[in-house]
Amino acid sequence: MRSTEKSFSASSKSLLRQRRVGIRSPRRLSAKAGEALGNIRQEKHSRSRPVRSCGIFGGDVHFRLRRVRQRDGDVESIRILLAERSSASKARTASINQIHALLVSAPEAVRQDFRRFDGDKLAVALARTRPALGTTPELIARASAKRLAQRHQALTADIAHIDHQLRLLATRQNPALLAASCVGPFVAAHLLATAGDNPNRITTKAQFAALCGVAPIPASSGTRQRFRPSRGGDRQANAALHRIVLLRKRHKEPWTMAYIARRTAEGLSDRDIVRCLKRHVANEIFALLTQNPTRRATYRTAASTTPSNRRHRPH
């Protein structure tokens, strides 16, 4: 009873305080106040809408590809091979990790025999062993390690075969893409799979940047004007663009190093510079994907949707 009386007195005191100050409860809001509140919410919604529509997709108010991605050509074969390679790579990593975990807890004699090996050399050494038959922990550990090593070698051979097929398909589909700086078969395959068998459905560089997740998003705060990377799009294509940027930085490509020096002098951080470089690389890849002569001969609508033949090079 005392607790209920205290809560009732506290609520009554707060209501009296609101009436003194002039604050009305939500039930007593007038029609004009409710209309004003609705206008404020509508204004906030309209102000946040351009950030979601224009900022993410780099200028396109509604980013929707008018045509779906075709899956009846070499790019579909590339996509299937990439899915198989991903699972094989994960299984190979799991096998070598299991080998290391097995050797850590194996008997001392087993650890002593393979202590000097690591990585692929460890797998080769274990695959060449001939453990005797038996049920002791040492013999079982040797036999299990050999089977895991043979599994690792089989998966490595499968990955090498898949990489060879990816190189052949990517070279036949778009040789100009493989000729670009720091673009290998694996990276080119991911980019081709993102574009699909009909890359001309992507009509602008902004659409391709949004598809790859490299379109800038405004993230300004106060007087500081900045952008942040996009977390949407195809993450495999985003990772491929990231690899290109890292390789160009590692190999000291002249244009890339000059761009980094100029943007560093302007006060940009390393993450912002990498974000800008990924967008420039996306523009370059878009030009290579949509301006290939063999593709223009395949698709009838390429002449109306392909940009000029000048290769885009950011300043």
Image: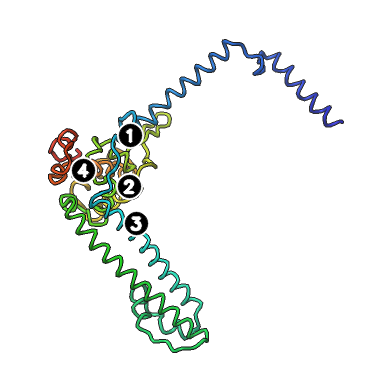
Nearer-N-terminus badge (1/2): 1
Nearer-N-terminus badge (4/2): 2
> Do the residues under discs 3 and 4 have CB atoms within 8 angstroms?
no
Q: CA distance from mark 4 to mark 2?
A: 14 Å
**Residue at the spot of label 4:** 284
**Residue at the spot of label 3:** 83
> What's the residue at 36%, 63% (across, down)?
89
- Which three-letter amino acid code belongs to the residue tagged 1? Arg
Q: Is residue 11 above or below residue 195?
A: above
Rendered-image quadrant of the N terminus: top right
- Which three-letter amino acid code belongs to the residue tagged 2? Asn
Task: Kindly indicate the quadrant of the structure image that contains residue 284.
Answer: top left
Q: Which mark is residue 238?
A: 2
**Residue at the spot of label 1:** 64
- Which three-letter amino acid code belongs to the residue tagged 4? Glu
Nearer-N-terminus badge (3/4): 3
Q: Which mark is residue 271?
A: none
Residue 303, position as x, y percentages in the image = 14, 35
> What's the residue at 86%, 31% (across, down)?
2
234 vs 110, left or right, is: left
Q: CA distance from mark 3 to mark 2?
A: 17 Å
Please tell me whether mark 1 sits on a helix, a strand or a loop: loop
Nearer-N-terminus badge (3/2): 3
